[in-house]
Amino acid sequence: MVFDNHNQVARIDLSLKRQPRNALLPAPSLGSGFEDVCIDHRYRRVFCLVESVEDFDGQLRGFVAEYDDGGRFIRCTRLPSPLLKSNKGFEGLAHMWRGRREYLYALSEAGHKGKGRIEVFVRGRDGEWKASHRISLSQKAEFEDYAALAYRYRQLAVVSQASARLWVAEIDEKARAVVRGSETVYRFPSKSYGNVEGIAWLAPDTLVAVSDRKKKRQPDRCSDKDQSIHLFRVPAR
């Protein structure tokens, strides 16, 4: 788990009980805090997303800090796509292998014509991330904002904090597109879930989520589920 105002990564056992391995690990980076985190399950590396930083050429870009499973810093690499605004950069990150090729999926909050989209990057031989392709989100996923994404088991999930909705769809990896007819939008169990900020697949029908702190303008009910870890069973589609 990461924090948007601290350069630390929290390692928490999924039993959600006190365990010796639970820890706060320092995570040196270009920015102050992270927007999302994902894991390379093959080599047990951790990737932390920096939403936007001004690059050497004056352009705003997202960066990804990479660590080993012991929390040791490996590198920090730019995502080549330029951003328009510092607070409308990349909000979510997912990692996957396809054969010997390594990919990052980055959720962009300010996509084409105001719609969200997913920029996909492939690792080059030099270790840098190169633009690969783009997945545009459909009308069903036109939310007020975009907070995080998760991609595993050929299932893509995108969550909106402001809309309090979860969009799930299957991905055709060869066609690099959403499988037609596979999309579903879910509401959270109650209106108290107004601050979900991160998600990850634990199983094909189970998501773990984390929630941000309640904002002053939000209803008091949002404090019931803020700053917490949640487990959700996704209904069969």
Image: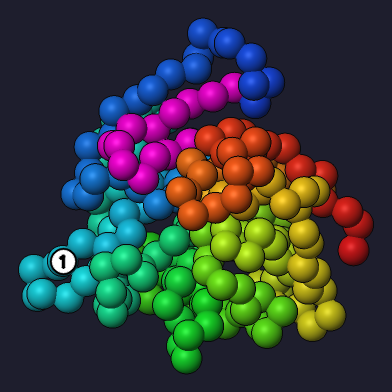
Residue at image coords 72%, 37% = 231
- Across and down, in percent, residue 97 comes to 55, 56
Residue at image coords 68%, 84% = 139
Give the structural element (helix, strand or loop) at label 1.
Answer: strand
In the image, the segment drawn in magenta is 1-13
In the rendered view, how is the structure colored? rainbow
Residue at image coords 10%, 74% = 58
The quarter of the displayed image where residue 10 is located: top left
- Across and down, in percent, residue 111 comes to 45, 81
Image vertical order of residue 127 relative to residue 137, above or below = above
Image vertical order of residue 195 relative to residue 181, above or below = above
Q: Would residue 94 be seen by someone viewing this image from the given angle?
A: no
Say left or right for 146 vs 140. left
- Across and down, in percent, residue 102 comes to 47, 59
- Across and down, in percent, residue 214 comes to 51, 44
Say left or right for 106 vs 168. left
Mark 1 = which residue?
A: 54
Judge by depth and name the residue closer to the eye, 224 or 173. Answer: 224
Residue 6 on the magenta segment = yes
What crowding class fits label 1: few (fewer than 14 Cα within 10 Å), some (14-19), or many (20 or more)? few
Residue at image coords 73%, 65% = 168
